[in-house]
Amino acid sequence: MMSTVAERTWEQTDLAPPEVAHLHHFLGAWQLIADLSFADLLLWCRLSASQGFVCLGQLRPVTAQTLHPEDAFARVVRPEELPIIDRAFAEGRSWRRDEPVLVDGLQVRMEAVPVPYEGRVIAVMTMEGIPLGHRRPGQLEQTYLSCALALTRMVQEGNFPFEGEALDPELSPRVGDGFLRLDSEGRVLYASPNAVSAYRRLGVVSNIVGERLADIGVEPSLAWAALHMGTPLEAEVEVGSTVVLQRAVPFLRGPHRDVVGGMLLVRDVTELRHRERMLARQEAVIQEIHHRVKNNLQTIASLLRLQARRLDSPEARGALEEAQRRIASIALVHETLSRDPREAVEFGEVGRAIIRMVADGLTLPDRRVDIRFEGDPGELPAEVATPLAVVLVELVQNAVEHAFGPGGGTVVARMSQEPGFVRLLVEDDGEGLPEGFNLAESGLGLQIVRALVGSELHGKINISSGASNGGNPGVTAVVDIPLRIGERQRDG
């Protein structure tokens, strides 16, 4: 979601929603142009209320030092300040300053490229870089610049960005990872040193420059399909233990989108894939541990339940049943964790399961108690979910056992995620708190709640008479737990 400043900036233009969407897509794809041209890119659009242009986007190259360390977003310029922008808008074609301009004392080469959408120029991209001077650029630099020229021509003709292309900025290969320049037949015209190294790891030891990709012994279908279809493609090639990610980008010309060449970006992702596989194995082990812990806890709970049935003392039997429910609530958390490799729990699912468990174990035919769970606190880390499950069991169990007379009543557990904390509210429409109630001197169940909320969850608990769901005084228990418990523990 855009910030308020960004929203206000885009609203200063007369862009229609489809045009705004097209420019956002363009901003997600233009890193290639910046890196290949060794230039800062700025995107300009006409202001709707006055003569002038506002900067809607800025991108710095990875391959060169930026000329704009300051943030240019939302900057407004008059037409006379940058006349090549006005000219590119008016004529719908690229313009380049014949002589470098001075920016903060540096000579800067500047070019303005129109960005059309459905036949109308909706923005202009300026490219600003350091002049090459009198030196002869090296082959890599020349090849980069020729590819940048091909892409800017595609921008001007409406062929870039490619429709529907979505890149992963963290994973997709970049120019510096490895670069091959291809002709329209898939022949390698240039290969950067990093690209040569990547292909050597795939087992290609011969010189690949001048060879067709189909002839060098590595799966060529990606580049061939991209050139044949006129659309970029991305895929991995795996040979032995080596994994190389490839991204093929065709160069298009004219309204018929004729393929005139292309480039292949390659990135050695062997170590990344190795780490991912190790993590996958570790996650599988963790899930199996949670599964076994859940089974063991359920076995212990079953043994306590069987033992309770054999006891004659109601007090002893009740104590074992309470312990069984506490263990079963922890088992529910581990059951959820065993289905998800992340150490996090959708606590709404756990909460509803706990309420069903408590309702099945405590509701008696001669004393009907309606127990409900409402709200959704979202996803909680395991270190929060486990003690919170026990707190929920104890509060609901305490309300069912102590709030009502023979007529029964209603207990509602509500959970929500507020800014910075999670709130658990358990309220009943029972007879209210006994006179002289003191949480610090309460029974075992509330002492467990008090200890878990204070020491494990670093939260606060308040129990008071008064509820919103009935005519009786009732009792309301409110537990607030900070979301960033780990940080609180480190600070303590």
Image (cartoon, rainbow, N blue to C red):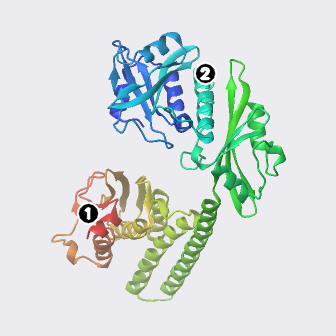
Q: Residue at x 72, y 19 (%)?
A: 256
Which residue is at the far top?
90
The C terminus: image quadrant: bottom left
Q: Quadrant of residue 410?
A: bottom left
Label located before the other in sequence (2 or 1):
2
Q: Position of residue 468 (x, y in %)?
A: 28, 51
Q: Is residue 137 left or right of residue 374?
A: right
Which of the pair 361/409 is nearer the observer?
361
Residue type indicated by callout 1: Glu
Q: Is residue 487 above or below residue 114?
A: below
Q: Dot 1, how many residues are within 10 Å of its Cα: few (below 14), some (14-19), or many (20+)?
A: some
The percent position of residue 370, horizontal first and vertical second, equals 41, 59
Would you name the residue on which mark 1 appears? 431
Q: Quadrant of residue 405?
A: bottom left
Q: Quadrant of residue 29?
A: top right
Question: Label 2 crowding class (10 Å Cα cut-off): few <14, some 14-19, many 20+?
Answer: many
Instruction: Between residue 62 and residue 16, name the one nearer to us.
Output: 62
What residue is at 58 percent from the left and 26 percent from the top?
152
Residue underneath mark 2: 158
The one nearer the camera, 241 or 292, is 241
Q: Secondary structure at mark 2?
A: loop
469 versus 448 height, above or below: above
Whole-number angstrom distance, CA of label 2 to CA of label 1: 74 Å
Residue 248 appearing in the image: no
Q: Is residue 116 above or below residue 261?
A: above
Q: How many marks?
A: 2
Q: Position of residue 129 (x, y in %)?
A: 46, 32
Placement of the N terminus among the 4 image quadrants: top left
Label 1: element kind: loop
